[in-house]
Amino acid sequence: MQKRGMRSREALLQRLEGELDSLFDFIHQVFADNTVAIEVLQAVLRKATRRSKQERYERYLRLWAFRITVETIRRVYPKYMGEQMTGQKTSFEYLALEEKLALFLFDRAGLNQEEVASVLQIPVGRVGSSLTYAREKVAQKEFGWSPADMLSLRERVNFQMGLCSASTLESDYAQSMAEARQWVAKLPTRYFSEIESSIRTTQLLPLLSRTESVRWKDISWQYKLGLEASMLGMVGLLAVVVLPWLFTQVNADAFVEGRFADVFEHSEPMAEAPVLEEITADRLLASSEAAVDEDGGVAETDEFAGMEFPSGDTYETGSAPLAPSRQAAAVYRLIVQSPSPQDLIPQVRSLFAQKNVRERESSGRVMPGGVYFDGITSLGAYPELLKDIQKLGQTKTYSHPGQNRNPNERARVIVWVQQI
């Protein structure tokens, strides 16, 4: 089938080779622009290659090629005229498009009246009137002819079509029309071979010989039915399997909070996480009491200020004792009661950012009974942070100020937004 298509395109190329000169000249006379003429010829050859599979053109190749050319010109000409600058002159600008086409097809391409009507897809009588108006306008603009006693349209059309002799008309009119016809016929001819060789061999001729891509309307209904069934199966698989799996990978809380980098979770095989017990006010209060040894205090040379806090997850759930080095650090615990703790997540994070509180890894975790926040700040910044947090709801404070009183020393702030 592919070899048959190649032979068909080669036969079309061989037949069209003799018409390329007349086609290119016809297009160039309409536009008088070499670049536009080449673009239009490209479109004509592309359309001819496509339509040669469906239309029988062998007996009427010349008319078939000119009809495709006229269809392409009619589609391109309005855009071409709209892009012309004001005051810029174009070829035969005093003629309407239909008059141009009739004039060049009759006087330059050598078609007769019926053939021109077939190419333009208009009645035969309309061809005669268009040709008459076109020649008269050419005579007026190019030779300064002005009608004295204008003949009737029927007499003028009959003369233009050769249905009556010049002896029956005024000699001035017959001579002017003959001069106009000869002037149009003697316009410089534009040959296809005059196009630059690189453009001709790489952009125009390959259109008639290259393999065309398969189009949907050229496929038989059996193949269409199979392709449509395959597409429906893929859509069903996407809806039933892929989309539910994709939704399980989306972190809705991160999307709501604006942390778009964490929206898609990357699940990896890991051991089951321990179930976190609910943090209550009593547990948080009990964990804030410092277990200081009665016999001796902590030395003043404590190195806590230069150390990073551990994660504290096991400690906050009540399963780890208080480390001795942490007994000297300032720890502030705040319990904020709210009917919707998760709605306060953006506000607490915003306060931490404004007050330069550096959140720890476990901060912002949603747990049974509320939301847990944990951060590092300075002793001097804590009072202002406390005032802002108290505006979020009823707040209880449980503090372990530690032994250092330097405002620049670091302190730990734990905020528990409790569900009420």
Image (spheres, rainbow, N blue to C red):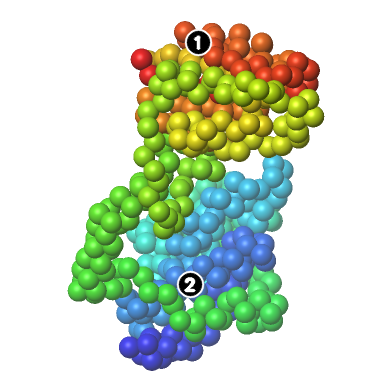
* Figure check: 187 above or below 263: below
> Going 61% across and 69% down the picture, which residue do you hit?
38
Q: Dot 1 corresponds to which residue?
A: 396
Q: Would residue 41 appear left or right of 273 to someone viewing this image?
A: right
Q: Would residue 139 appear left or right of 380 to someone viewing this image?
A: left
- Which residue is more in the foreground, 224 or 105? 224
Residue 5 visible in the current orientation: yes
* Figure check: 387 above or below 14: above
Q: Residues within 10 Å of mark 2 (few under 14, many from 20)?
A: some
Q: Would residue 396 appear left or right of 54 to someone viewing this image?
A: right
Q: Position of residue 376 (x, y in %)?
A: 65, 27
Q: Dot 2 corresponds to which residue?
A: 46
> Tag 2's secondary structure?
helix
> Going 32% across and 79% down the picture, which residue do you hit?
56
Count of numbered circles on the image: 2
- Which residue is more in the foreground, 239 or 108? 239
Q: Position of residue 357 (x, y in %)?
A: 66, 25
Q: Image quadrant of residue 176?
A: bottom right
Q: What amino acid is labelled 1 in the image?
A: Lys
- Which residue is more in the foreground, 324 or 76? 324
